Image (spheres, rainbow, N blue to C red):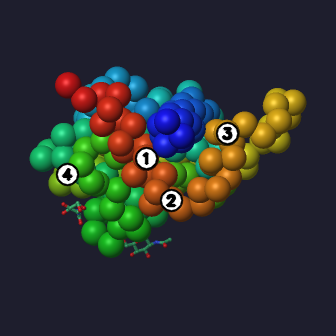
Amino acid sequence: MGRNLWAIMYVTVMILMIIQVVESSLHRVGGGRYTWNSDVNYSDWSNNQTFYSGDWLYFGFDRKIHNILQVNKSSYEKCIDTDFIFNITRGGRDVFQLVQPKPYYFICGRGFCLKGMKLAVNVLPQPPRSTPTSPITPASTAISLIHSNAFTVAILTLAFKVLYFD
Ligand SMILES: *[C@@H]1O[C@H](CO)[C@@H](O)[C@H](O)[C@H]1NC(C)=O
Ligand SMILES: *[C@@H]1O[C@H](CO)[C@@H](O)[C@H](O)[C@H]1NC(C)=O
Ligand SMILES: *[C@@H]1O[C@H](CO)[C@@H](O)[C@H](O)[C@H]1NC(C)=O
């Protein structure tokens, strides 16, 4: 009985946390289901979004065909996929957190960058919260307790597996 109650509370907190993370700050790159492909104009997409530090990018793609690499500005401009900064490619439903207020650059290797699969996002500092009225909620408590990126990536990946499993 008591154990069941804890299990329900635990699951509720996890769901609230996932909803908060997903709603507040997750950008589905390019939109659509397979968000990372050569049919999207990513500069148009990125120009219509506002990115704040702490926001997440979601890339959905077929990892047998595409990959996703964080690179520096010159590698972005010249489509150089060697000596990248970070390889985001995992299962094809992958997330990346924009931690700092600065420009970030991403490309698809294997020649796709030259076909337009490149993304630049300019990340702004986190604005002050516009709704400071709510007291401590379970979700915000859970989020403030979790500083591990790896854990958050795991939770988001799990959430997407659940949401988009077919
Ligand atoms: C960007 O990375 C490339 C390697 O891919 C390196 O040669 C170059 O010096 C770097 N440029 C800057 C501005 O850091
Ligand atoms: C990126 O990581 C994935 C998964 O770990 C791996 O399969 C792939 O070879 C890596 N890509 C590069 C360019 O290192
Ligand atoms: C994306 O669209 C803009 C105009 O909105 C254009 O200048 C740019 O060349 C396009 N990029 C690609 C990769 O097609």
Q: x and y percent of residue 107 in the render?
A: 34, 51
Q: Amino acid at mark 3?
A: Pro
Q: What kind of element bears circle 4?
A: loop
Q: CA distance from mark 1 to mark 3?
A: 16 Å
Q: Amino acid at mark 4?
A: Gly
Please identify the quarter of the rendering in which residue 139 is found.
Answer: top right
Between marks 3 and 2 in the image, the one whose residue lies nearer the viewer: 3
Q: Quadrant of the C terminus?
A: top left
Q: What kind of element bears circle 2?
A: helix
Q: Please give left or right for residue 125 compared with residue 104 in the image.
A: right
Quickly name the residue at label 1. Answer: 155
- In-front residue for pair 3/94: 3
- In-front residue for pair 3/160: 3
Residue at position x 48%, y 47% from top? 120
Quickly name the residue at label 2. Answer: 149
Q: CA distance from mark 4 to mark 2?
A: 30 Å
Q: What kind of element bears circle 3?
A: helix
Mark 1 near mark 4, Cβ–Cβ under 8 Å? no
Q: CA distance from mark 2 to mark 1?
A: 10 Å
Quickly name the residue at label 4. Answer: 111
Q: x and y percent of residue 12 in the render?
A: 54, 33
Q: Residues within 10 Å of mark 3 (few under 14, many from 20)?
A: some
Quickly name the residue at label 3. Answer: 138
Considering only order in the chain, which callout, 4 or 3, is on the residue closer to the N terminus? Answer: 4
- In-front residue for pair 139/24: 139
